[in-house]
Amino acid sequence: MRIAAAKDWIVRRLRSRRNWIALALLLPVSAQLYAWHHCRTGQAALAGERPDAARDHLERCKSIWPWSIHGHVHLLSCRAELQAGDLPAARDALREARRLVGSTTPELAFEWALLRATEGDVSEVAEYLQRRADTDPALQKIVWQALSEGYLDLQRYDWASHPASSGSNSGPHTGSGDLAWTPRP
């Protein structure tokens, strides 16, 4: 009887070890699937122009993939920050992507150009961005948004610094003199 009990104990123990081994193998795989899911969902949120949802999903993805597959997730985070209007966070995401990649890639250069255009440094990057938009129609909307924001920032700055914005009858206002353009904070 003792031999049968010992045999049952050993069999239960082996089953338990097999379960632990299976669990140890499945945990990393499930974590990778979790990160992949949030990366794809973040991309879909970016395509749907929902930057807050994209930020949440991409942050969850970066918690599993801090190295982010050649900076890809950090580039997506930069795009989400640009859509949300958080330019310092976009700059930080680009710096982290640059650190991870180790060199400048065409994708990094494009995102830097978008950021610079959005910040109002349009003259330096407009030609490059227009060429990219012409060669890749999928990028046209993003490029034109960045260039438009940059040109608007330049115009706001010009109007705000012009004496006409202090209430005279010239300048960009409704005619009543109560609406003057000011730079974005």
Image (spheres, rainbow, N blue to C red):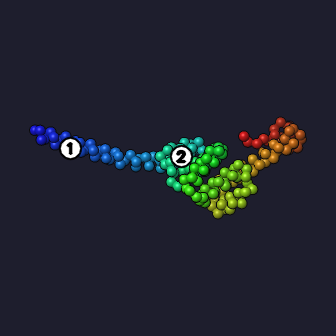
- How far is disc 1 from disc 2 in space, using C-alphas? 44 Å
Residue 173 picture location, percent across and down: 83, 41
Observer-nearest of 170 and 13:
13
Per the rendering, the mark at residue 11 is: 1
Residue 45 pos. (x, y %)? 56, 47
- Name of the residue lying farthest toward the right: 169
Answer with left or right where residue 21 lies relative to residue 39: left
Check disc 2 and give the amino acid type: Leu
Front residue of this view, candidates 175 and 161: 161
CB atoms of marks 1 and 2 within 8 Å: no
> Which sits in the foreground, 126 or 179?
126
User: Measuring 81% from the left and 38% from the top, which residue is drawn there?
Assistant: 179
Q: In the picture, which quadrant includes the C terminus?
A: top right
Which residue is depicted at the point 66% across and 59% down? 133
The residue sitting at 61% across, 56% down in the picture is: 108
Q: Neighbour class for label 1 at 10 Å: few (<14), some, many (≥20)?
A: few
The disc, 1 or 2, on the residue closer to the chain's N-terminal end is 1
Depth check: give the residue in front, 84 or 74.
74
Say which quarter of the image contains residue 172: top right
Q: Label 1's element?
A: helix
Residue 26: image location, x then y, percent? 37, 47
Question: With 21 as the anchor, is 59 left or right in this view?
Answer: right
Which image quadrant: the N terminus? top left
Residue carrying label 2: 58
Please name the amino acid that badge 1 sits on: Val
Which residue does the image show at 60% across and 50% down from the upper left?
Answer: 95
- Crowding at mark 2 (Cα within 10 Å: few <14, some 14-19, many 20+): many
Return the x and y of residue 147 as percentages of the image width and height.
71, 53
Q: Quadrant of residue 183?
A: top right
